[in-house]
Image (cartoon, rainbow, N blue to C red):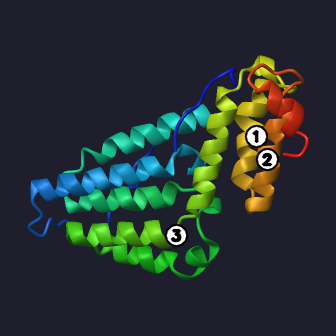
Amino acid sequence: MAAKSVSKKNKGTGPSNAPASNSGASKKHIEQCSKKLKKFSFKIGFYAVKLEEGESFDTAQVRWSDFRRTIRTCMSVDDLRDKLLGVCIRMDARFLREPWVQQDQNQWMTTCRAAKSCNDILASLRAFEAHAIIWDKVDTVHELMDIANQIPTSQVNTTDSAFWLTTYPNRLRAAAGPCEMALHLRTLCTELRRGAEVAYADWARDERPAW
């Protein structure tokens, strides 16, 4: 909550087992691929990333930002391959489609590790983006947290910062579908104290009950 605003959205993945090769990839192609991968990782955001044991979301945000910054240092196809695999490895499984995890993830990782060109990297990136990630959930979690972080603590019933910085985002991350997510959206409304200045008076009086 307003106690501490958090905004979007590591350790290395280790050396790749694939043979080092740029396969004639130019510096320009490497840079273009790197930009696309960095943009992709920004779109995912840190709320969709696995937390390490005992880690706060503040720390996870810093860790994810640090990892994203390393993407622009890529100098080869090997570097790009390791970073793309790193994105996959770091994602919380609850933001990945279960059929993809069960049926396609291993093959995707094998294909990605075998990438020998920027075109191969981009093909793996497009496949991951299109088939693996539950984008509706990624977007909704970040949107609701953006709203929650903008509401001052003085305007809500629950003033314990731990609820807004830990409990609430964890509940969003655990939501199994639109119905559960809608309940957490309703929480934002019910948490607004009576007469809260951040809510339009006409809406609070006339529309809030039906909403």
Position of residue 194 measured from the top left corner of the image (x, y, whole percent): 90, 24
Residue 191: which quarter of the image? Answer: top right
Q: Secondary structure at mark 2?
A: helix
Q: Are marks 2 and 3 in contact (CB under 8 Å)?
A: no
Residue at x 42%, y 56% (from the top left corner): 86
Residue at x 69%, y 20% (from the top left corner): 3
Compared across the picture, whether 17 is left or right of 25 comes to right
Q: Determine if residue 15 is in view.
A: no
Position of residue 186 measured from the top left corner of the image (x, y, whole percent): 82, 44
The tag earlier along the polypeptide, 2 or 3, is 3
**Callout 2, which amino acid?**
His
Alpha carbon of mark 2 to alpha carbon of mark 1: how far? Answer: 8 Å
**Callout 3, which amino acid?**
Ala
Q: Identify residue for label 1.
A: 168
**Callout 1, which amino acid?**
Tyr
Residue at x 79%, y 37% (from the top left corner): 188
Compared across the picture, whether 36 is left or right of 161 comes to left
For the C terminus, give its image quadrant.
Answer: top right
Q: Identify residue for label 3.
A: 132
Residue 199: which quarter of the image? Answer: top right
Residue nearest the viewer, comparing 66 with 179: 179
Residue nearest the viewer, comparing 5 with 183: 183
Q: Are marks 2 and 1 in contact (CB under 8 Å)?
A: yes
Q: Secondary structure at mark 1?
A: helix
Compared across the picture, whether 87 is left or right of 146 comes to left
The tag earlier along the polypeptide, 1 or 3, is 3
Q: Identify residue for label 2.
A: 184
Position of residue 25 measured from the top left corner of the image (x, y, whole percent): 12, 64
Residue at x 87%, y 35% (from the top left corner): 206
Task: Name the mark nearer the viewer: 2 or 3.
Answer: 2
Residue nearest the viewer, comparing 176 with 13: 176
Position of residue 82 measured from the top left corner of the image (x, y, whole percent): 34, 59
